[in-house]
Amino acid sequence: MPGTYRQEPGREWNVFAEKWYEEYPDFMRVYEAGGLLFGTEDFQGTLFRLPLRTEIQAKDSEIRKQAFTESNVRELIEELVKSGEEILLFLKSIMEIRVYEILADGNGEKLEVLSIVTQNVSEVEAARNKLLSAIPDDVDSLVQQCQNNSTGLVSISYRHKIETVTAERTISSICGRGTGKSYSSHV
């Protein structure tokens, strides 16, 4: 692909503006199963396509000589299950994480293997927006606000209800943020 090199195989592209749908239609169709419909100009999400390769395939790869197998994917998913609640709790605009397996038969069918989803989106967005609106846009103003405010900065408390679903189990959690403390309880 243009702009990729063995030393830097990954990067961000504006595939619509760079006319990838016309120039690389087969490559772009791979992402349809993930929700990026052919010709889409504005995709509201992020897709990761993991480059599975066996030891034999890795030996011939121009990008990476290291195998990346199903067990590597399972390890990544296990780590995501362990840290998914914290990811949703501390990132300001992510409300859900979903992992799908796109089946190899090529018909675009996908199987959801993990979902980590905020159950009370409106409440969380409202609390986050209150906090974000109190923070100045530039660093100098933020530093000055911190230095000049002897009573403390803005404090927001809210509940963040998160449900994690894997093939094996469902975990419902209520996480809280406020006054510099966080808590989590599993149900």
Image (spheres, rainbow, N blue to C red):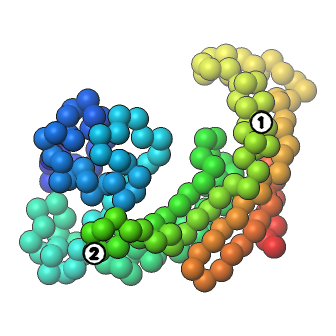
What is the quadrant of residue 69 in the picture?
Answer: bottom left
Question: Residue 130 in the image: x percent, y percent?
Answer: 78, 30
Residue under the image location 53 percent in, 61 percent down: 98
> Which dot, 1 or 2, sits closer to the camera?
2
Residue 134 located left or right of residue 46:
right
Q: Which residue is mark 2?
A: 105
Residue nearest the observer in this picture, 159 or 156: 159
**Residue type indicated by callout 1:** Ala
Q: Which residue is mark 1?
A: 126
Q: Residues within 10 Å of mark 1 (few under 14, many from 20)?
A: few
Q: What SS does tag 2 mark? A: loop
Which sits earlier in the primary sequence, circle 1 or circle 2? 2
Q: Can residue 77 be seen?
A: no
Q: Can residue 18 be seen?
A: yes
Residue under the image location 62 percent in, 62 percent down: 116
**Residue type indicated by callout 2:** Asp
Question: Residue 86 in the image: x percent, y percent?
Answer: 66, 57
Question: Residue 71 in the image: x percent, y percent?
Answer: 38, 81
Q: What SS does tag 1 mark? A: helix
Residue under the image location 55 percent in, 69 percent down: 114
Mark 1 → mark 2, Cα distance in angstroms: 43 Å
